[in-house]
Every structure is written in C-alpha cells, then in structure tokens.
Image (cartoon, helix red, strand yellow):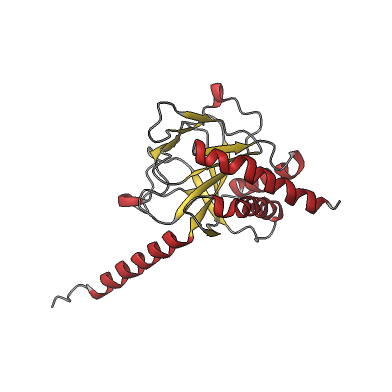
C-alpha cells in the first residue's frame, strides 16, 4: 500500500477519533511525535536559521494596543511565512499535514466551516524570562476558530526552562499545562473558551502557529474592517490655513 495512502488513512482516523472528540469534550488536544525525528529536525534547523540570521521581529499586540510591542506583556520574536519560501520544504510539508487533519475534521467542528487559514507564525522566546500574559486569540470575532501550535524544543525541562502554555478552559475548575516539547502538535479553540498564557521561558523556545478561519465569521470580519476603513477615509481632517 503506498505510503501516502497510509498517511491519509492515519490522519483521517486521528482527526475523527481523537481531535474532534477532544475539541468538543475539553476544548483542546495535542499529538506527540507528529512528524518524527528526521523531518522535525529539518523544521527545527530552518527555524533556528531564521533566528540566527536576524529574520525574527518583536511580536505585536492586537486589540486596543494593536501594532504595539510591549515586552512585559509579550516577549516573543516572530516571522510570518507561507511555507513556499526557499528552504522551507519541511515547513511546507508540516503545514500540508496539518491542513489535511483539519480538512478531515470537516463538518464535525460544530458551527464552523473551515476553508482557509493564516500564514504560519514562527515564534521564538529568547530565554530571558519573557512570556506572553493571559489572553484570548480571538476575543472579538475576527474569524479564527482553531489555533494550532507545533513545538520544536528538544530536551525541554519545564522545571528548569519554564515556557509552559497554560490554558484556562472557560467555566472549568482546572487549568491545563502543555509543555512545549519537540514534535508536539497542539489544537485548541481560538475564542473565549480558551484564555491562555505562555509562562516565562528561561531557555530559547521555538514554536510555529497557524490559525484556521471559519468562513462566515471571517467574511463578516473583513466586511466590518472594510466599512471601518471607508468611514475613516470619509472623515479626512480639514486643512488648516
């Protein structure tokens, strides 16, 4: 049986028997050893090269402080990539597999209909004790419905290195701590059901995040943005003599 066919079958089974039930039952799930050592290493080396070459820039805040970098609130350095850039073949392979997983979830994601996603956000916490304060990825209906994070940190010891992603599931009496270990793939709902934080990191911490969009909410968000932009253009300031 061709390897590609086995992979498709496995991804479909994982999506239907694990990802979908977990998202509906507890709002998040993760898969370990997703790519395997060899391909995972290729992704890690490309991300390390981006970091070494100074391609990452300070992460910006969204919401009222949109476009502002405040290191005490968010300490990561990031770069947005499509996966088709030179040297990003392994990253493109990773994104293709994640896309397939989400596609296999299909209509079983409740009210959501997913047909597009963001670019991938490569992120590095440089290990100087910075993190990301508690926040919600999509508090205001911008279309994001699923957050997907792939971790790239070998020999990570959270007792020494910190860097845990802590999720505060809405209405629950517990928190969920996810260690950012190498080749782990995490899914969770992007809306107010899953406030989360990145605890301070004391070693270099790499991750890659993509967001999947609900088609209807995304279209509505784009429409609101266009209307807001048009309104601002119409309110051009008067020239003073």
Eyeballing the image, is 16 above or below 198? Answer: below
The residue at the point 40 percent across, 30 percent down is 172
| Left or right for 38, reference 112 | right
Total numbered labels: 0
| Left or right for 238, reference 56 | left
The residue at the point 28 percent across, 73 percent down is 233
Furthest residue toward top = 159
Q: Residue 45 location in percent, x, y?
A: 69, 44
Q: Residue 30 location in percent, x, y?
A: 59, 37
**Can you tell which quarter of the image residue 19 is in?**
top right
Furthest residue toward left = 241
179 and 186: which is toward the camera = 186
33 and 45: which is toward the camera = 33
Q: Is residue 125 visible?
A: no
The residue at the point 62 percent across, 54 percent down is 99
Q: Is residue 215 visible?
A: yes
Q: Residue 63 location in percent, x, y?
A: 34, 51
Q: Residue 68 location in percent, x, y?
A: 36, 50
75 and 24: which is toward the camera = 24
Eyeballing the image, is 216 above or below 65? Answer: below
The quadrant of the picture occupied by the C terminus is bottom left
| Left or right for 67, reference 201 | left
Eyeballing the image, is 42 above or below 106? Answer: above
The residue at the point 45 percent across, 46 percent down is 190
């Amino acid at each position: 049986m061709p390897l590609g066919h086995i992979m498709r079958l496995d991804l479909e089974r994982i999506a239907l028997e694990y990802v979908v039930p977990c998202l509906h039952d507890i709002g998040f799930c993760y898969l370990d050893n997703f790519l395997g050592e060899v391909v995972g290493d290729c992704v890690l080396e490309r991300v390390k090269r981006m970091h070494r070459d100074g391609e990452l820039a300070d992460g910006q805040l969204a919401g009222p402080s949109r476009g502002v970098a405040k290191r005490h609130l968010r300490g990561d350095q990031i770069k947005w990539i499509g996966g088709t850039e030179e040297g990003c073949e392994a990253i493109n392979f990773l994104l293709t597999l994640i896309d397939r997983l989400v596609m296999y979830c299909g209509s079983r994601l409740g009210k959501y209909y997913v047909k597009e996603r963001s670019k991938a956000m490569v992120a590095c916490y440089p290990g100087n004790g910075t993190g990301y304060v508690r926040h919600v990825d999509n508090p205001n209906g911008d279309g994001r419905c699923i957050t997907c994070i792939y971790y790239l940190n070998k020999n990570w010891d959270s007792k020494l290195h910190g860097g845990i992603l802590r999720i505060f599931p809405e209405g629950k009496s517990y928190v969920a701590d996810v260690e950012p270990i190498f080749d782990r793939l995490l899914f969770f709902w992007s809306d107010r059901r899953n406030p989360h934080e990145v605890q301070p990191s004391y070693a270099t911490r790499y991750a890659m995040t993509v967001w999947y969009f609900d088609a209807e909410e995304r279209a509505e968000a784009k429409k609101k943005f266009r209307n807001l932009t048009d309104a601002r253009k119409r309110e051009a300031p008067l020239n003073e003599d």
